[in-house]
Image (cartoon, rainbow, N blue to C red):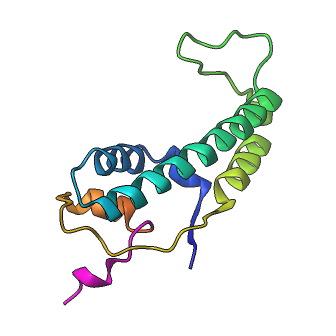
């Protein structure tokens, strides 16, 4: 069964930092290979999300004001409602990673918050009593 989530994961800083931490953790070869495949697929899907996000921002941004050094743009008040609607639709798009979930690797030591951020990626049933 494929792993399903929404584009919202790409705006979730904790998800990104936790997946990076998972990808850098030593583990058995099967788990490491699976994590690497998941990470690569998320990278591809993340690039698609960034492209789509940029299009939404360009559509609604104030063209008279230059973006800040860190790329932030101004959305005029009259565009905020439509921008919010379009951006939420983008976040709500379901993405599918064509790999089966695997049991949570015992080698991973994560905080409760980190586990919560990535539980859509793993089969967590082995952690339940």
Percent position of residue 39, x then y: 47, 50
- Magenta span covers which residues? 121-129
x 28%, y 44%: residue: 24
Q: Quadrant of residue 101?
A: bottom left
> Is residue 48 toward the left or the right of residue 40 in the image?
right
Which residue lies at the image location 24% right of the left edge and 49% below the top edge?
Answer: 25
- The vertical placement of 74 against 105, above or below, is above
Q: In this view, does 57 lie above or below 1?
A: above
Q: Residue at horizontal 76%, vertical 48%?
A: 86
Q: Is residue 118 toward the left or the right of residue 54 in the image?
A: left
The C terminus, quarter of image = bottom left
Q: Position of residue 66 (x, y in %)?
A: 69, 9
Find residue 124 and report its horizontal and vertical position in percent. 32, 77
- Residue 123 highlighted magenta (yes or no): yes
Whether residue 3 is visible: yes
| Residue 80 visible | no
* 73 lies left or right of 64: left
Q: Which residue lies furthest to the bottom in this view?
A: 129
**In percent of the image, x 37 and y 50: which residue is there?**
19
Q: In which quarter of the image is the N terminus?
A: bottom right
Q: Residue 23: horizontal and vertical position, in percent?
A: 34, 48
């Amino acid at each position: 069964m494929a792993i399903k989530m929404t584009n919202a994961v790409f705006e979730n800083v904790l998800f990104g930092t936790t997946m990076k931490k998972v990808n850098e953790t030593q583990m058995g070869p099967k788990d490491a290979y699976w994590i690497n495949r998941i990470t690569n697929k998320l990278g591809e899907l993340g690039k698609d999300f960034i492209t789509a996000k940029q299009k939404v921002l360009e559509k609604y941004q104030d063209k008279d004001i230059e973006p800040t050094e860190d790329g932030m743009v101004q959305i005029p008040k009259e565009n905020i409602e439509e921008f919010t609607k379009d951006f939420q639709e983008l976040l709500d798009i379901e993405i599918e990673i064509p790999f089966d979930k695997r049991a949570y690797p015992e080698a991973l030591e994560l905080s409760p918050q980190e586990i919560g951020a990535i539980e859509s990626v793993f089969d967590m049933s082995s952690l339940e009593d």
